[in-house]
Amino acid sequence: MVCDKRCGRRWYGHVKGKAEFCREHKRDDMVAVYGLCQEDGCMTRATFEATSKKTHCVAHASEAMKRVDKVRTCAAPGCKKAPTHSAPGQAALHCKTHASGEMTKRYTSRDCRADGCEVEATFGPPGEPAAFCGTHKAPHMVPTKGLRCEVCSTRASFGRAGEVARRCSDHKEEGMVNVNYAACRVEGCSRGRSHGPAGGEALFCSHHAEAGMINLREKLCSAEGCSVEPVFGYPGEERTMCMKHKEEGIINVKKKTCASDGCPLAATFASPGRVRAWCAEHKTEGMENVSRKKCDEPGCQHQATYGLPGTATSRCGRHMLAGFVSQNLHSCISCGLSYRIPKDTLCGYCDPDGRLRKATREAVVEEHLLKTFPDIPFRHNQRVPGRFCSDERQRPDFLFDMGTHLVDVEVDEQQHNRHPEECELARMYRIVATSGLPVRFIRYNPDAFRVGGRLVTVEQEKRLSALTDEIRKAMEHPEPGRMIDVRHLFYDHPMEITFFRVVYRRHTNFAMESIVQTANGQMDFSKRTSINLSRNGDLITNAWLQVTLPALDQHVTVGGSTSTYVHYVNSVGHAMLKSVEIDIGGQKVDKHFDAFYEVMDELEVPSEKRAGLNEMLGRYDELDTSTTGSLVNQSGQRTYYVPLRFWWNKLPGQALPLLALMYHDVRINIEFRSALELVKSDVALIQPTSGGAPLSFIDASLWVDYVYCDAAERKRFAGDAHEYLIEQVQFTGDESIPASVSSSTQKIRLAFNHPVKELIWVITPETSAAVDPKNGNMLFDFGQIAGVDYIQSAKLMLNGHDRYSERPGTYHRLVQPYQHHPRVPSKPVYVYSFALESSSHQPSGATNFSRIDNAQLYLTTKPNMPAARCKVLAINYNVFRIQGGMGGLAYCS
């Protein structure tokens, strides 16, 4: 059927066919074929004439041709663009390129409706005209121009050569090409034209582009003189810079990222036949890497890297056919040999930090281990056996499983001097955590090293012989109580000791300043307050709460009785804090309780600092037993200072880098106790007062120390990924111990997770813990009952087995703190440590409670003990990762 002439103009037909149908009666697979450009493969309307007939489009018109359609052109000589800009009140005379400074765009009905947007509207609600551009479209809008994809509502641009577009880029079938662009001029190539001389037109695809040609289809890097396609930009904005010229704080905004919330990694995995949506870490069972084409050989899962010249890759190296060549190989600029590397770069053997050079060194060690230990199997570059979390990056170089422990041999080229020490430490910790066994690390440097400042080289045979001796020692047996042991071979050694020279090490430049934070709401008794830490500096270290409490009314009459004294409770600085937690990017990273602060002060604060800290917190033990009003230092108006104890408050090397957390807020949440819980009196107060009014904070603020780094260190913190080995506190709530005349044993279930380095527990009598200003409100009454220890003995059981034989309570109160902490507490604080040095940041032992199904603590009380409450705290390790401006825990509860 052909449209009747009276029906309308016949402009539509099949590709390379005659125009037989009008717009109203055209079929879905027809395109406009009337009046097209005569250039081979071009589907654009002809608007320029050579003689007296329109023969070419604007892209293929020569300088001698002139525009003869009804559309006006820019007034600038030689410009073929349509006029869009003019002075106010005038008709459009110039295009955007040739418009002067005072000219503005003359808006039309086809422009995007967003304020200030000059882009053509191509999206709108289904069945309605276009209203917005691609940037400002709403989620429900669909494209109104061009053909739509057969699978989704996206604009179709891919189809078979010579056919119309039927699919979008996400749903294109094998063999489809972008038919919206003219094909490459090379005969037999179906790729679209994208490259050409600067200032000219696109003539070739990227594979057949000649030297000096640039990509004219895509935008170029904004750096002056750069012809590379930009892939980096600020989040939520357009890409403007290439890898070489990217600025601090910008990310790759071109790649499709993983569908998991907050994951910045590229999406490469999906179910077979589906569009890629997940990264390797968040993929589920049955998914495969669909971002790379696989070999056409049936059953082969290798990547296709070989094909005929000028065609797409279709076979892997094992199944390539005659005449096939690799299309992923480029010549090394140093040795000239071909490798699978980017253009104009060094190969892995010529690059000092290349993976191939590392592989070569590992191959030498592997060959040596196979000859030396032929009967002992080992794993090379594989996951740790029995792991419970998926993390492809934590694969030891060589791992021997000795049954009772593991031996990990790491080949550290150049001593891994470009790897931050905290990242190496976190990696070793993760290997121990996932294996659940003690690990002996041997870090072997195959390169030169320095002794006393002089460069030293050792023959390879001697190196390997020393490595063999060290491995045999590590295989024999693990050292009791140590989960991690590290030996460094052929690392730098400092010079010998001299009494007549002082050696100084230069440090990076920095500055520090204490800045008060603004709370979201009022800080006061019985309230919960959230504080967003401001981004005033690069890093944050120390933090402390500063609270001024009002003077208490004395001689208060209650029920006919007048008080002799009213004062704040002992250690009111800690007692006022019901809980303190840190939240990063909406994830609770750590949470502390008042008892934790009091206990850690007992175990770690040295004697020379105790007096000052006691004054800061209002800690006076006689307050718990005083029956007079002489303690005015705890009754009048006074300011208290409470240092926080999060991981980033302990060491400068663990300072939290705010500049690397560009897209995550850091928040401190504080919950305060009621005023009635924080006072002591000799009468039963109903409500403590100050000046006759209910108690309220006079002033309260959170202070934080900010660190300002120099330019080089700021760049490293902002651009690199970071991993911090942190400590967390676990507390599952109070455990009740009933009163008993005779000795009794209480079983406490320890529902903890992660590698725990230490268990701490304290006992508080029920009367002391009760909310009662007269007889209770002694939150930190960990003292002895009538001079006698509450705990007679204790025992820990893991999965039904005794972790150690039953020990007396004094062993956990005196011996354990003496062995593993810098101070033996004056109050009864009971400890059991899995580490050699519990107070040190350097890990020296832990037990992975994530691998333990049933952990129980048995406490045997002495006779005639009153009812009490037991608090059990666990100090565990975890890893906090920062990457792509966001941070999060590696292991969640």
Image: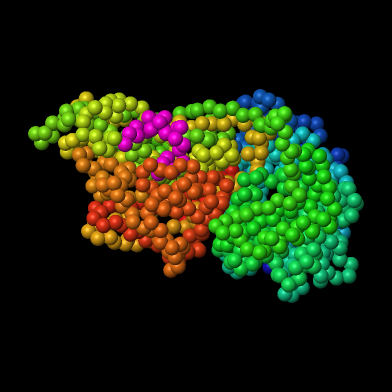
Q: Bounds of the magenta span?
A: 599-621
Residue 833 in magenta?
no
Front residue (pair 423, 699): 423
Q: Is residue 665 above or below residue 551?
A: below
Residue 763 visible in the shown view:
yes
Query: Height in image: 589 above or below 286?
Result: above
Residue at the left extreme of this rendering: 560
Image position of 692 (left or right of 892) = left
Instruction: Decide which of 715, 60 is in the foreground and name it.
Output: 715
Q: Position of residue 281 (x, y in %)?
A: 60, 58
Residue 641 left/right relative to 356: left
Secondary structure character of the magenta stretch overall: helix
Q: Tell me the colour scheme of the image.
A: rainbow
Residue ID at (49%, 49%): 819
Depth check, front residue: 302 or 824: 824
Quarter-of-image position of residue 175: bottom right
Instruction: Locate residue 582, reporting x and y percent.
Output: 46, 43
Given the current orientation, which residue lies at the most extreme right position? 336
At x 53%, y 51%, the residue is 836
Residue at 46% of width from left, 62% of height from top? Answer: 804
* Residue 45 percent location from the top left of the image: 75, 50
Question: Residue 180 occupies which quadrant of the picture?
Answer: bottom right
Tell me the quadrant of the picture where the N terminus can be found. Answer: bottom right
Residue sitting at 75 percent across and 68 percent down? 373
* Image location of residue 113, percent across then percent down: 55, 40
Look at the image and tell me whether residue 264 can be seen.
no
Q: Report how many numbered discs are placed on residues in the image.
A: 0
Residue 614, magenta (yes or no): yes
| Closest to the observer, 638 or 661 | 638
